[in-house]
Image (spheres, coloured by chain):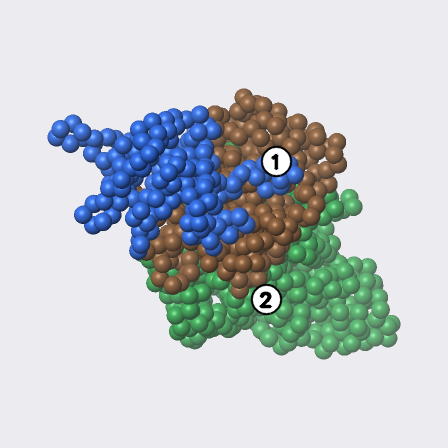
Amino acid sequence: MPATEPTPPLSSGDGISRRSFLRVATALSAGVAAMAAGLAPLRKLEHYSSVDEFLQKHYLDLNPAEMKRVLARIEDEVQRQYKIRPHVRDFRPMNGVEFVYALNLSRCVGCRKCVHACVAENNQSRNPEIQYIRVLKMPNDGSFDMDKGDTNYAPKAVPEAGSFYMPVQCHQCKNPPCVKVCPVKATWQEPDGITVIDYNWCIGCRYCEAACPYFARRFNFTAPSIPADKLNPNMSYLGNRPRSKGVMEKCHFCVQRTRDGRYPACVEVCPTGSRKFGNILDPNSEVSYILKNKRVLILKEELGTLPRFFYYFDV
Amino acid sequence: MDPRKTTLTLAVLTVLFLGLAVVFFRTPARPERIFQAALVPSDALAIVPDTIRISAGRLVSSGGDASGLQCYACHDKKSPPKIVYDANHHVVLPKEHRDLIYSMRNCAECHPANDPVKLEYDADNNVILPKAHLRLGEMAHGSVLRNEDCYTCHDPNQLDQLHTAEGTRLTLDNATLLCAGCHGTTYRDWQAGAHGRRSGYWDQSRGELLRQGCTSCHDPHAPVFTPLIPMPGPHALHARN
Amino acid sequence: MRNYLRFLRRCAGVSLQGDWRYYTWIGVLGLLCVVGLNAYAKQFVAGLITTGMSDQVSWGVFIANFTFLVGMAAAAVMLVIPVYIYKNEDLHDLVIFGELLAIAAIVMCLAFVTVDLGRPDRFWHLIPGIGKFHFPGSMLSWDVLVLNGYLLLNVYICGYLLYCRYQNRKPAKALYLPFVFIAIVWAISIHTVTAFLYVGLGGRPFWNSPIVGPRFLASAFTAGPAFVILALQVIRRATSAPAEAGPLAANGAVTPPVPTRSRAATLADLERLASCLPEIATVAVEERRAFLRDATVLTVPTGGILLHQGETDNDAFFVLQGRIVVKRKEGPRVRITRDVGPGEQFGEVSALTGAARAATASAEVPSEVLCVPAPALRRLMRNPKVNEIVTWRMTERLMIADHSLLILRSIVQVSMIINVFLLANELFTAFYNSNREEISWRYLVVGLRGFHALVPWFWTSVTLNLTALTLLVLPLSRNLKWLNVACVLCIFGIWIEKGMGLVIPGFIPTPIGEMVEYLPSRNETFICVGIWAFGLLCFTILLRMAVPILQGKLSRWNEA
């Protein structure tokens, strides 16, 4: 072959000399070493998942025996992390019950006790801070435009003149956009109207957070931190058991209380009694009375979400 | 193909990869905690589901200091106390009742326990009453007719009970029916549950539903709610916001 | 099967070979990949708090890049449509490059989605049957299906076509043509489904508009072919070398050719040809005799030249024995367009079209070729089987002609016009009325309530797009230098428009009116760079394997 024949950079065939193979192999090995070293931060990974948790089936597919095992495992996990043995139960929906929430905008003073009662009851992360309820301070100028709302008000005392206060949380919509978009059905609506999340099934894609028109859903951007002395040990699987990083959570109408027949924490703590909760299928409940007799409104009705959260006024 | 250039390139790459490996291995995986909020912790006391005010009935039943409710310890049964008016013909609540009035307010409704109150003193070392407390101990029931007669509600012949317009006698912890006499629509809402706070069990087959009487939230002498100190709002996840 | 494994092994081997430029490129990409991997490991440990995302802006540059790259992958089909529907053969040899780009782009998309997940270990929840796949309700489930399907389609089509080329076999139409047509429809669908991810959210008025889907496609078909134009020029450059002194000198002069012996062709030669080109066996015996009257057999020693670039003789050649390398001189550089062995042809394009020779053919090893004048070739091609194989093999060369690039330029031009027009529609709708629903547009274009982080991004993208559009519309961009400038402007302008200009404003303000802005963190940026580097690495390695196969340099004839 003529020595001066022009050869393009790409050589044909596999005629590769031992020396050049060694050179390439050395560089390649260094690359692989760098790759392995690049994974060094994983040394600090603390309890990401157990085999049981990884293989756990969806909540709706667990039989009672499996559920018992899962609950026991969760109790073990919580005890290991917080040194407190909780009581984790699986509350099932009650028959003939559909929960509805009503909020009296004539009475809310914006004190945010509901926000913090919820945080305490539902074991939400303190740092980074997760709050299911957002209270909007709205100007009393004749519009309900939420863009005019302010969530960061911090006056010396509330209520402030010329404003009304509108707390927003998950509306447990009858036609929930978040349920529709979840690719793995980790969130669904239960027969009693509560939209729940299986924290061990959620993959953390945050599509539901993008879909919610009420900014109701929260994501654990890192492992939640709850001070052990503030932990609420009365937990439920679908409700207030501590979540892990990378999963979604949201208001679930305090499912560990309401399915036991009690009021949610936000209802109980409200000092002005603005919050109303009950079974709409019971004609004698306060929410039935409100929906029958008061002027109620829902937010973003044009989206067709059919929320179960109604705002009303005293007359 | 220049084998020398190739060797040099591969050598440089090898060194860079190994250097990177060392850097990775030695750099601690400190997660960048971008924002450490100095949060005001949710205070357990401020979010306890207690009412703004403790009614007379609850004060007695809870074993609190109800000595202020022993009217005839100071007053004469034969002669009911005279009502004192100020220059504008507004009722002046007797200052002897002030302790009772204060003790029936739930301080934690406004003051979170982790935010202690700072007392202010005047030149004579007397406590300066904060503006927010000025309404306590005032008589301000109504804005037009203003209820300027104590005996509209209080029974002059039996000071430790109340009476309605038609003369029905009510004990101090049964004031709800008295309020209903004027505030009928609110009373109707309260009975149905649309007004006033409910707690406990909504499902009464499992437990007790707790309703609050009117005087558990509203001081009958100044029923309008005192402004509350709001609890902290949301903190952003990242510091720059 | 054994042959296939050998093919794979050789491909793997060739991907590790190259000159210092190749190693530098691969090495730099590898370094960036490793840095990205380390950044992801940090994110895996700490959670997504290492990014700039928050509850208010819950999707960031990961999903922005994902959206852009789905468009790039879909645009590969822009090469397929002209070739298979409009029968534009000029682009035929470039279809593979578009599909390889699609493969690399889809790999990047899948990587971006994976790093965005909060719990990537739970990906198995997506698998239908084992997990709980929410199909057809959730658009994300549609996206999972169509993206993986598209990846498999392209891997299959490319793999099949390249393997056939390697085996010197004509691909069976039934095994690839239906998939190609499916791929055309599928490509449109992957980007429409991705658009529907956003459009389907009623709570986000910025996205909930019918024009978003068409905007996605228009911008994809601008940026995709623009990238292909740039990539093809890089391939063209990388597959050529500076012309050195030798039989093909830089100034075009040719050293005296080494003597070539020729003789008349015989039936025995045709038999030899038929043994490596079975289609010849379908020719009737009388025709063979007539054919042989004009055909000659040439014996060339190594280095012997059979045709010269630029000349207008019109013989076609079939190789009987040995290997012929066909090189084209492009300016100061030379590249191999074909490397043919027994049974394969060369010179047939100018024989059949009458064009000047596009390249120079010389023997790599002592060879024997059958020389067929053009009329004889045409007569031969009246046989359908011969016609089929010769026509197919006409496309088997690495030409990347300027003409092809100009066809792609037209595609980019029209798509950019449509893209800008659709943006104008959006702006009119947003600003003509004081519609409260369009508040996110206000944030993006002029800022809102004191927040204006995205305004410079928007105006930069508009400037880039309009400049690119102007260049593309002017004949100036027929010049490759200006075309390249326009393409770069397109890609960056559309990246910003689709990324920062579409994904982020949808979240600001939040549905309840909060204003929280977004900026990618350093860790997030490293991961993005790492994934881009990984995608480019995949693309480079795929090209490194595909180009020699397409040239014919890597084929079963030279299995050592």
Checking the image for residue B207, the label placed there is: 1
Q: Residue at x 37, y 34 (%)?
A: B104
Residue C96's place in the image compared with B116, above or below, is below
In this view, C88 is above or below A134? below
Left or right: C388 as drawn, with respect to A120: right
Identify the chain of the residue marked 1, using the numbered disc in the image.
Answer: B
Residue lying at 73% horizontally and 41% vertically, measured from the top left: A61
Residue C78 has which mark?
2
Q: Which of A227 and C301 is in front in this view?
A: A227
Q: Which mark is residue A146?
A: none
**Which image quarter: residue C313?**
bottom right
Binning the other alpha carbons within 10 Å of mark 1 as few (below 14), some (14 to 19) or many (20 upward) gives few
The reply to whether callout 2 and callout 1 are in contact (CB within 8 Å) is no
The hue of chain C in the figure is green
Discs 2/1, front: 1
Q: Residue furthest right?
A: C285
Task: Tell me: B214 left or right of A87.
Answer: left
Kindly identify the amino acid type of the residue bearing the numbered disc 2.
Met
Q: Which residue lies furthest to the top in this view?
A: A83
Specify few, some or many for label 2: CA neighbours under 10 Å numbering under 14, 14-19, or 20 or more.
many
| Mark 2 and mark 1: Cα distance apart in space | 69 Å
Furthest residue toward left = B123
Q: What residue type is labelled 1?
A: Gly
Residue C147 in view: no
Q: Which chain is assigned blue?
A: B
Q: To which quarter of the image does residue B31 belong?
A: top left
Q: Is residue A228 visible?
A: yes
Q: Which chain is brown?
A: A
